[in-house]
């Protein structure tokens, strides 16, 4: 059985969400927010893209930039689902630790975006 928690929904329905799935969904949402916030900031010359790969995509095509961000979000969610369904407990725990580190990085990026969106 995987590590997870229960969520109580409307109508008293209880849903068990494994941490791997929960973390990957949070990361995916933050990645999508990052994509749209970066898109907005670059369009309005408020920020610069510091990731050279994403900067190349942005310069090539803003639509391609957003499409890649969306595909990355779908990929991390799908990969996490596969790890949850097909991996052993030890690997799931290691993967969950890695997802937690990635989540911390995305929360820092989210905080930077909130700062410049509200202050700059």
Image: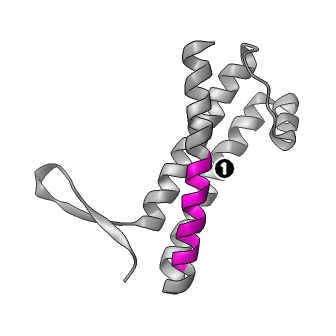
Badge count: 1
Front one among 119 and 59? 119
Name the image colouring. one colour
Q: Residue at x 56, y 52 (%)?
A: 103
Q: Residue at x 54, y 60 (%)?
A: 100
Q: Residue at x 63, y 44 (%)?
A: 70
Front one among 47 and 56? 47
Residue 40: x and y, percent? 66, 21
Residue 74: x and y, percent? 59, 54
Q: Is residue 5 left or right of residue 22?
A: left
Up the image or down, 80 lies above or below 30; here it is: below
Q: Is residue 25 left or right of residue 56?
A: left
Residue that protrudes farthest toward the left in the picture: 11
Q: Which residue is mark 1?
A: 71
Up the image or down, 25 lies above or below 20; here it is: above
The part of the image, by quadrant, that contains residue 78 is bottom right
Instruction: Please identify the dominant SS of the magenta region.
Output: helix
Q: What is the quadrant of the C terminus in the image?
A: top right
Q: Estimate how packed mark 1 is, as few (under 14), some (14 to 19) or many (20 or more) residues with alpha carbons within 10 Å.
A: few
Up the image or down, 43 lies above or below 99; here it is: above
Up the image or down, 44 lies above or below 91; here it is: above
Q: What is the quadrant of the N terminus in the image?
A: bottom left
Front one among 42 and 117? 117
The magenta segment: 92-105
Q: Is 58 included in the stretch rendered in magenta?
A: no
Secondary element under disc 1, as helix, strand or loop, is helix
The part of the image, by quadrant, that contains residue 69 is top right
């Amino acid at each position: 059985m995987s590590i997870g928690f229960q969520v109580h929904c409307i109508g008293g329905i209880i849903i068990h969400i494994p941490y791997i799935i929960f973390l990957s969904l949070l990361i995916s949402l933050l990645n999508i927010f990052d994509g749209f916030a970066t898109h907005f900031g670059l369009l309005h010359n408020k920020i610069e893209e510091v990731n050279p790969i994403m900067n190349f995509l942005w310069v090539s095509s803003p639509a391609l930039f957003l499409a890649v961000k969306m595909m990355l979000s779908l990929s991390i969610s799908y990969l996490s689902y596969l790890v949850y369904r097909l991996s052993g407990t030890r690997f799931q725990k290691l993967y969950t630790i890695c997802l937690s580190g990635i989540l911390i990085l995305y929360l820092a990026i989210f905080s930077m975006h909130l700062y410049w969106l509200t202050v700059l």
